[in-house]
Image (cartoon, helix red, strand yellow):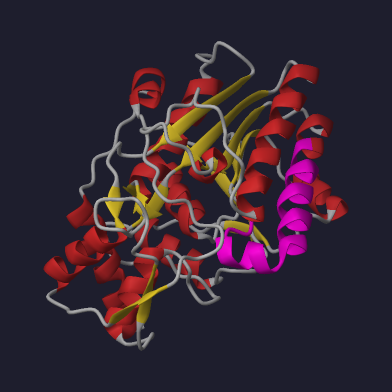
Amino acid sequence: MNSKNTIIVTGGAGYIGSHTIIELLENTAYNVVSIDNFSNSSSKTFDRIEHITGKKIVNYAIDLCDKKSVENVFEKEKNIVGIIHFAAFKSVPESVSNPYKYYSNNINSLLTILECCLKFNIVNFIFSSSCSVYGNISELPVKESTPLGKSESPYAYTKQIGEEILKDYSKTFLNLKIIALRYFNPVGAHISGLIGEDPINKPTSLVPVITQTAIGKLKQMTIHGTDYSTRDGSCIRDYIHVTDIAIAHIKALEYIINEKQKRNFSIFNLGTGNGVSVIEAITAFEKISNKKLNYTIGPKRAGDVEAIYSDTSLSEKELGWKTEFTLNEMMDSAWQWELNQQKE
C-alpha cells in the first residue's frame, strides 16, 4: 500500500478533474485516487493522463450516491488527507428539462461524500462550485461577497444548495476545513494537446460546440440570443483556461492543509476578470484556426445568464493565484485537442 498521503478526486475522468489530476501528479507529492462512473466521460481519459504524466491512476467506477460503495473506497484507501469534489451533472439546458436528475445526483452525491469525511475523519474538502450561483445580477464584476441572485437553472440551484450544505456542515463539525471554488467558464485543453473537454453527451458548453462545428462533427452551431443588453447582443462570460483552474485547486488544497484558512468555510472566485461575449469568442477562434464557423442566430436559451465576469482580487491575495493563459491560447489549445482527437 502506498504510504504517501492521498487525495481523492471525484469526477477524475471529467474535464476539470482530469486536468487537476495531472497538476497533482506533476507538481505535488500526493498519491491520487479517482472516483468516476463515466456517466459523461470516458475511461480513455486515464490512458491520456498516464501518457502525459507516466503515472497510472486508480479509479473506482462507482455511483457517488451509493453510500456503501463510497464507504468501501474510503475503507480500502489509506492516508486520505483531502477530497476534491468535482463529480456532478453540469448541463444547464439538461437541468431545465430534467431537474430531478440534477437534484438527485448533485445533492445526494455531495451528502454521501461529506458523511464519509465525517466517518473517516477527513477534514480537507474542496468543492467545485460555479459562477452560476450569482444568477442575473447588475453588479459587475462579481465579488465573493456579492449577494446571490435567483438561480436561473436547476443546475445553478444545486450549486447554491451545495454551498449552503457545506456552510452548515462547517458550523456543526468544526474540524472540517472547506473551500468552495466558484468557476467562471473553463475552456481550452492541456498544453500537450493530448487531453481536453470530451463529453460523451452532445456538448452544450460554447468552446466544444465551436471546435466540433469547425471540425465537422456538428453541421452548425447556434448563438442563443443576440438581443441581450450587452455590447454586441450576445451573452458575456469570463472564460478561463482549464489548466489555470486546475492549478487553483492545488493552491486551495495547500491553503487549507497548511492551515492558512482563517475560517472553516471559504469561497473564492476563479476567473480572469474579463468579460468576453459569445460573438467575440467565436471571432477569436476563427482568427487562430483560420476557419469560418457555420452558425445561426437562435432564441435565448432557458437558464442562461446575460452577463457575468469575476472580481479576482480575493483569490489573488489569499491563494496567491492568478490566471496565465490568454483567450487566444484558450482557443488554440482547444483546437489542437480537437485536431488530435481526429488522429485517434
* Residue 34 seen from this side: no
> Which residue is more in the foreground, 114 or 153?
153
Residue 213 located within the stretch drawn in magenta: no
**Position in image of residue 79 (x %, y %):** 67, 34
Q: Magenta stretch: give its range.
A: 87-114
x and y percentages locating residue 239 in the rendered image: 33, 50
Q: Give how far across and how far down residue 302 sits, in percent.
A: 55, 63
Q: Quadrant of the C terminus?
A: bottom left
Q: From this view, report whether residue 292 is shown above or below residue 22.
A: below
Classify residue 301 as left or right of residue 40. left
Residue 92 magenta: yes
Q: How many marks?
A: 0
* Quadrant of res 198: bottom left
In the picture, the quarter occupied by the N terminus is: top right
**Which of these two is toward me, 195 or 151?**
151
Residue drawn where x is 32% and y is 87% of the image: 216
Residue at (34% x, 43% y) in the render: 244
Picture quadrant where residue 111 is located: top right
Judging depth in this view, the residue of 106 and 280 nearest the camera is 280
Q: Residue at x 26, y 63 (%)?
A: 279
**What's the residue at 71%, 67% (across, down)?**
98
- In the image, 46: left or right of 230? right
Spot occupied by residue 157 in the image (x, y as percentages of width and height): 66, 46
Q: Work out whether 245 lies above or below 53.
A: above
Task: In the rendered view, tell whether residue 7 sits above or below residue 21.
Answer: above
- Compared with 293, 48 (above or below) is above
Residue 26 in view, yes or no: yes
- Horizontal side of 53 relative to 325 (left or right) equals right
Name, please, the residue furthest toward the right. 68
**Secondary structure that dominates the magenta span:** helix
